[in-house]
Amino acid sequence: MSKIHEIPTGCTMHKRDELNVEDASLMQAALNVALKAYAPYSRFKVGAALLLENGEIVSASNQENAAYPSGLCAERVALFFAGSTYPGVAVKKIAISIDSEEKDLTLAYAPCGSCRQVIAETEKRQNNPMQILFEGPHNQVICCEGIDPLLPFAFRLPE
Ligand code: THU
């Protein structure tokens, strides 16, 4: 608990074993898919599981490449797959989980800046925020109501 003193307004922190069944199983789906990540370079395996408004769960892992920037984060693999396979179906929740021997259990593992931007675009596209769940310190889960607390002043083109 020592390294995180504040979480952004709009986010809450929960003990993992006190999550509701839906959130607990989405976090578990994210961990399950993280185990299948292709991350031979960083050995930092990430999984993202989306709950769609039609009840489908879409999950994906990070996919790395010898040309490092050609790889892609788990969140964006999942969101782009959902956007192309289920266009028009809103994403209600995204859960993110990590599998790495180097995981420091005192830290939180929030989505990176580029993934936040893609979450912001998805929210704009569906005209609704999504819940964002990720690992907090000491076996806790942080839940944010939409991307705004994680990405204030997101880039948007004029309409
Ligand atoms: N990674 C993700 O999959 N999601 C994030 O939000 C941050 C980082 C991946 C990218 C790379 O494959 C590995 O984690 C180490 O940065």
Image: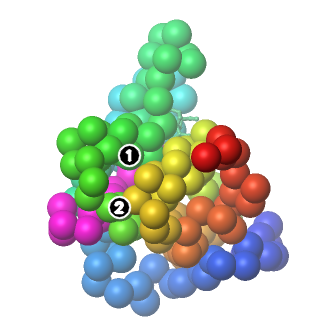
Count residues near mark 1 (Cα–Cα under 10 Å), then give few for <14, some for 14-19, many for 20+: many
The segment highlighted magenta reads: 45-56
- Residue 45, given in percent of the width and then of the height, sits at 44, 41
On screen, residue 156 versus residue 39, left or right, reads right
15 w.r.t. 63: above or below: below
User: Label 2 is placed on what type of residue?
Assistant: Val
Picture disc at residue 152: none
User: Label 1 is placed on what type of residue?
Assistant: Leu
Helix, strand or loop for the magenta stretch, by majority: strand
Count residues near mark 2 (Cα–Cα under 10 Å), then give few for <14, some for 14-19, many for 20+: many
**Whether label 2 touches label 1, CB < 8 Å:** yes
Q: Nearer the viewer, residue 111 or 139?
A: 111
Picture disc at residue 91: 2
- Residue 16, given in percent of the width and then of the height, sits at 45, 79
On screen, residue 124 versus residue 155, left or right, reads left
Q: Is residue 98 visible?
A: no
Q: Quadrant of the N terminus?
A: bottom right
The residue shown at (55%, 68%) is: 146
The residue shown at (32%, 61%) is: 90
Picture disc at residue 79: 1
Q: Nearer the viewer, residue 83 or 77?
A: 83
Residue 63 figure quarter: top left
The residue shown at (35%, 61%) is: 91
On screen, residue 1 versus residue 126, left or right, reads right
38 within the magenta span: no
50 within the magenta span: yes
* Element at label 1: helix
58 w.r.t. 37: above or below: below
35 w.r.t. 55: above or below: above
